[in-house]
Image (tube, grey):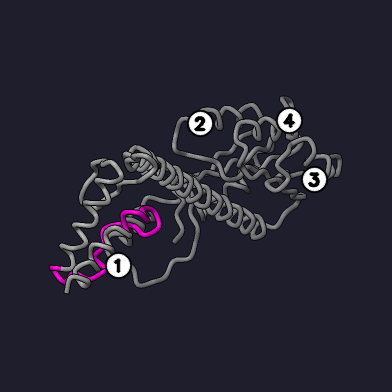
Amino acid sequence: MSHFAEARILVVDDEPDVLAAYGSVFSGIVAKAEDELETIANTLFESASTKPKTSTTVAGVDLCRQGEEALRWIEARQDEKSQYPIAFIDMRIPPGINGLETAKRLRQISPDINIVVVTGYSDHPPHQLAAEVGGADRLFYLVKPFNPDELLQLATALIHRWNSERMAAAASSEREARTLELEREIAQLRAQVNAKPEPAVSNGVIIDRLDSQSALPPPQAKDVAFREGRAAYGRRDGLAFCPYSALKQPELFLSWVAGYRSLDNDV
């Protein structure tokens, strides 16, 4: 069972019999107390129900006779969790604002709501409605009289679409938040790297020993490298253990190699 605990359906029509018909059609998808208990039980216990459920349920249906009343319903629930994925609005709802004006104001309050314009007349063609109400991808046209099964199917499909869009938006927001977090981490790492001291330079010779950060004059640095090369040969470390970079410190590298090979000459 797909239960949308925050979703409510809004209906605006000035005829009591029509509102009653809406209430009858949608009564099957309004969650009852036992439905909610069953949903909780299925969440807690895998085998609570052996019969698969495929129906859709919502929190409730709000039936309004005037456009102003519908707008008050929407505004009153702006600070609550309850939301309206869909509104069915009749075009002729005297004596207050008409259905077109109601739809326009409703779109301003709730931009993501699916609006189904219901009318028995052709005085508001679809292209005009789309131009004035806005959000053409969330605007639909239903002509009276309509089939109850088709009405229920349309409502169910739009509720599922609304929920999918909400989930996609939430996932996108989560990805954006994670991206920002990674960007902050990268910026912190970059700042740490930039804060590391630069290799010491003395007369154009870089002293960048792996085990020492001291800066030595070029002649003394070469002497140190030469002696370390001789010591490495004595330990039988091999040329691979040279602590200097052949690319960044060529003079020290060559001095180390010269010291390493000097013992071969002595032998």
Name the residue tied to disc 2. 78
Please provide percent x and percent y for residue 95.
73, 25
191 is higher (above) or lower (below) than 97: below
Please report whichever mark, 4 or 3, sits nearer to the chain's N-terminal start: 4
Name the residue tied to disc 4. 101
Q: CA distance from mark 2 to mark 1?
A: 35 Å
Q: Mark 4–mark 3 contact, CB under 8 Å?
A: no
Name the residue tied to disc 1. 46
Q: CA distance from mark 1 to mark 4?
A: 48 Å
In the image, taking residue 36 as reference, residue 130 lies left or right, namely: right
Q: Mark 1–mark 4 contact, CB under 8 Å?
A: no
101 is higher (above) or lower (below) than 86: above
**In percent of the image, x 61 and y 47: which residue is there?**
22
Q: Quadrant of residue 252?
A: bottom left
Please report whichever mark, 2 or 1, sits nearer to the chain's N-terminal start: 1
| Amino acid under disc 2 | Gln
Q: Which range is magenta?
A: 234-253
Q: CA distance from mark 3 to mark 1?
A: 48 Å
In the image, taking residue 19 as reference, residue 267 lies left or right, namely: left
Q: Mark 2–mark 1 contact, CB under 8 Å?
A: no
